[in-house]
Image (cartoon, helix red, strand yellow):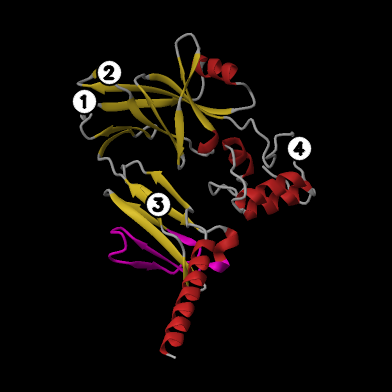
């Protein structure tokens, strides 16, 4: 009898373990996290629950010490955190009492001196330990007319918006030159930073594209140059057209829905075209708007 009872207990425990394990593995990892660099070198971490998961999330738990201490985030839609020191951020959530996998991201804060041109809001970020001196000044102004503006407009084209800046780095009232790239932070104003590019224009009007990345409403790039810079908004894409056939059809909405459900990975161009609500990803809300546009019930920008 004792052997039978022990066998039954072992069977129950094994079955429970299998059920818990199956439930655990069925929950997607909460990798709905976006990190942005702020001008003061701090980082903002934003948690945004996908639309299809909001009703399934009971609450979030997060920690910065591998869950030795646990903090609860009850907002099912997510939340926002600002970090000023390096740490490891861990996140998990519960759905119907079952704990998800843990998502962990390293937050690395590089101490930075920020030099800003107050007339343009353009900044240079100088990391701790950089040979670039921190007593430089950044001066500049925006050009809205004249020969340089006309030249830039001719080069960029009539169909694109741009801002033209003249930037100089000074030290002790003299222009400071360096072979070490500056970390420039260019504001995009009312432009969409995801679709902006930074160009350098020389005295002959020749344009050089500078590699840059979007950061909130700014573009971050590295260059050792000063002079004339352009922030160009390039929307040479069709909003809602994910398959690239030049049309907005139900197939595009279906593709957006598959991407939102993580059944397919989006290319960079698809993310640009399919992120209708501008939250940094393609979700079910985007798919719905694309489907409405395909049925001529909604017009996409």
Q: Quadrant of residue 13?
A: bottom left
Judging by the rendered image, the residue that carries numbered circle 3 is 45
> Who is closer to the viewer here, 62 or 272?
62
Q: Is residue 191 visible?
A: no
Q: Between disc 3 and disc 1, whose residue precedes?
A: 3
Q: Report, in whole angstroms, how far the alpha carbon at label 3 lies from the one at label 1.
A: 30 Å
Calculate the distance from the C-alpha at mark 2 to the C-alpha at mark 1.
Answer: 10 Å
Q: Indicate the position of residue 238 as horizontal and vertical percent values.
A: 68, 36
Residue that carries the numbered disc 1 in the rendered image: 131
Between the residue at mark 3 and the residue at mark 2, the CA separation in whole angstroms equals: 33 Å
Tell me if mark 3 has few (under 14), some (14-19) or many (20+) residues whose alpha carbon lies within 10 angstroms of its own.
some
| Residue in front for this viewpoint, 135 or 259 | 259
Q: Secondary structure at mark 2?
A: loop
Q: Is residue 279 above or below residue 202?
A: below
Q: Which residues fall within the magenta stretch?
A: 55-79
* Disc nearer the start of the sequence (3/4): 3
The residue drawn where x is 68% and y is 46% is 255
- Residue 135 is left or right of residue 109, and the answer is left
Question: On the rendered structure, is 236 left or right of 74?
Answer: right
């Amino acid at each position: 009898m004792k052997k039978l009872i022990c066998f039954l207990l072992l069977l129950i425990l094994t079955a429970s373990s299998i059920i818990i394990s199956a439930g655990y593995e069925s929950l997607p990892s909460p990798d709905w996290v976006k990190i942005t660099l702020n001008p003061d070198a701090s980082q903002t971490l934003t948690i945004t629950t996908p639309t299809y998961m909001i009703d399934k999330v009971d609450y979030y738990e997060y920690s910065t010490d591998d869950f030795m201490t646990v903090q609860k985030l009850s907002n099912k839609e997510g939340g926002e955190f600002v970090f000023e020191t390096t740490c490891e951020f861990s996140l998990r959530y519960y759905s119907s009492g079952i704990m998800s996998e843990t998502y962990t991201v390293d937050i690395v804060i590089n101490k930075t001196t920020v030099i800003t041109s107050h007339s343009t809001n353009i900044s240079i970020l100088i990391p701790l330990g950089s040979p670039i001196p921190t007593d430089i000044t950044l001066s500049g102004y925006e050009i809205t007319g004249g020969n340089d503006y006309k030249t830039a407009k001719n080069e960029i084209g009539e169909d694109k918006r741009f801002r033209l800046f003249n930037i100089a780095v000074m030290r002790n009232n003299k222009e400071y030159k360096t072979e070490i790239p500056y970390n420039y932070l260019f504001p995009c104003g009312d432009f969409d930073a995801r679709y902006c590019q930074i160009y350098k224009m020389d005295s002959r009007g020749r344009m050089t594209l500078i590699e840059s990345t979007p950061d909130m409403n700014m573009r971050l790039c590295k260059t050792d140059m000063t002079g004339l810079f352009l922030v160009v908004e390039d929307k040479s894409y069709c909003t809602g057209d994910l398959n690239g056939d030049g049309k907005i059809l139900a197939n595009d909405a279906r593709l957006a829905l598959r991407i939102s459900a993580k059944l397919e990975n989006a290319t960079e161009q698809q993310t640009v075209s399919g992120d209708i609500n501008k939250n940094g990803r393609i979700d079910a809300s985007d798919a719905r708007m694309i489907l409405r546009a395909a049925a001529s019930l909604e017009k996409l920008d």
